Amino acid sequence: MVKLVLLAMAISPWVHADEAASIALPFESAFATYQAYKDEAIGDWREANRVVDHVGGWRVYAKEARQADATDSHAGHGERP
């Protein structure tokens, strides 16, 4: 009985091959929604420096990054040294 079940399982993909060939599969090209690269407007670097100075300088950004790393207790797991 077990041999009969295994034989049926081995043959079943070929039995339904004709049915599978008649099924229409949807196709959408990867280029159908492609958007070309567009340059962004360049901002005033002096204004950017004023904003960073007003916030507290680069040390504030470094502190924020350090705090974000400290809250992730699983950081570095699974990585190779």
Image (tube, rainbow, N blue to C red):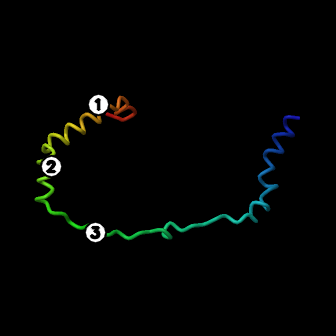
**Depth order, front residue of 59/54:** 54
**What's the amino acid at mark 3?**
Asp
Q: CA distance from mark 1 to mark 2?
A: 23 Å
**Residue 16 relative to residue 50: left or right:** right
Q: Which residue is mark 2?
A: 52
Secondary structure beneath label 1: helix
Q: Which residue is mark 3?
A: 39
Mark toward the start of the polypeptide (3 vs 1): 3
Secondary structure beneath label 2: helix
**What's the amino acid at mark 1?**
Ala
Residue 79, by quadrant, is top left
User: Residue lying farthest top?
Assistant: 73
Residue 73, by quadrant, is top left
From the viewer's perspective, is residue 47 above or below residue 76?
below
**What's the amino acid at mark 2?**
Val
Q: CA distance from mark 2 to mark 3?
A: 24 Å
User: Residue lying farthest right?
Assistant: 1
Image position, residue 12 (x, y; %): 80, 50
Residue 71, by quadrant, is top left
Q: Which residue is mark 1?
A: 70
Q: Quarter holding the N terminus?
A: top right
